[in-house]
């Protein structure tokens, strides 16, 4: 095992970092300033798309945060962080792993870009407002899922919670937490109490 993760604070690389911390796996961490394609000379030679995370395990190279978490639990388990294909919640688990980005962080990316990353003259308040609303409407599915439930699947904490938990963390960073409903708020507080979350968000 030779796990190496390129990371920027507050970015999606928190997902694999949080996963490795939960599993207590040994890893090497390279911390960079954001955005790494401009702040870290030579980064695009390592990862041509210039995004974080970038991850290697020997000859394995990966760039998708949730996929890296899935790789870690599948290759370095067995662990309760994974849901197996013969468990009844396997489909729910896969759905949340994918929904965490395709549905939840997608609108956040537009909010981030047009409220923070672009220069003042290119900022678009209308886009920020529209995609904040879009995010809140997509968050309804989470409120339903965690009403009366501590975690998203199989009655235990899994990487589905890590993946969705990052979307909530990013929402908080973007000032979108006011739109969390009661059970989503309680769920997020539960996730934040985990020592591995604390470690992954403070490195
Ligand atoms: N689908 C990728 C997205 C990676 C991504 O877009 N990362 C952002 C940070 S959260 C990034 O590196 N942005 C900088 C850039 O695009 O230059 C994943 O889930 O890891």
Image: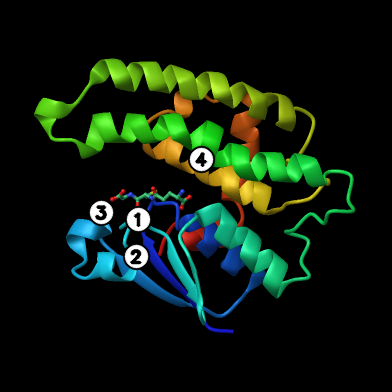
Q: Nearer the viewer, mark 3 or mark 1?
A: 1
Q: Tell me the number on the disc at residue 167.
A: 4
Please say if the residues under marks 2 and 3 sit with CB atoms less than 8 Å apart: no
Q: Which of marks 2 and 3 is in front?
A: 2
Earlier residue among tags 4 and 2: 2
In the picture of the structure, the residue carrying the numbered disc 3 is 35
**Residue at which label 2 appears:** 47
The N terminus, quarter of image:
bottom right
Residue bearing the label numbered 1: 51
Disc 3 residue: CB within 8 Å of ligand 1: yes
- Where disc 4 sits, the SS reads helix
Quadrant location of the C terminus in the rendered image? bottom left
The residue at 28%/15% (across/down) is 126
Are there few (<14), some (14-19), or many (20+) residues within 10 Å of tag 3?
some
- Contact between marks 2 and 1 (CB within 8 A): the answer is yes
Q: From the top left corner, tell me how far across and down residue 53 is, in percent.
A: 42, 60
């Amino acid at each position: 095992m030779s796990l190496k993760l390129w990371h920027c604070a507050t970015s999606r690389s928190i997902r694999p970092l949080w996963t490795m911390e939960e599993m207590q796996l040994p890893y090497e961490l390279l911390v960079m300033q954001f955005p790494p394609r401009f702040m870290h000379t030579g980064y695009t030679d390592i990862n041509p798309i210039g995004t974080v995370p970038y991850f290697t395990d020997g000859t394995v190279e990966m760039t998708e945060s949730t996929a890296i978490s899935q790789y870690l639990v599948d290759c370095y388990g067995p662990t309760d962080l994974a849901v197996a294909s013969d468990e009844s919640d396997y489909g729910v688990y896969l759905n949340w792993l994918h929904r965490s980005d395709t549905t939840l962080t997608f609108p956040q990316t537009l909010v981030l870009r047009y409220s923070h990353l672009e220069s003042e003259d290119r900022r678009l308040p209308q886009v920020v407002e529209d995609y904040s609303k879009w995010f809140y409407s997509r968050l309804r599915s989470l409120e339903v899922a965690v009403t009366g439930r501590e975690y998203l699947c199989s009655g235990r904490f899994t990487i589905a919670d890590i993946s969705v938990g990052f979307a909530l963390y990013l929402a908080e960073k973007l000032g979108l937490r006011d739109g969390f409903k009661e059970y989503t708020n309680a769920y997020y507080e539960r996730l934040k109490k985990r020592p591995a979350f604390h470690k992954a968000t403070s490195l």
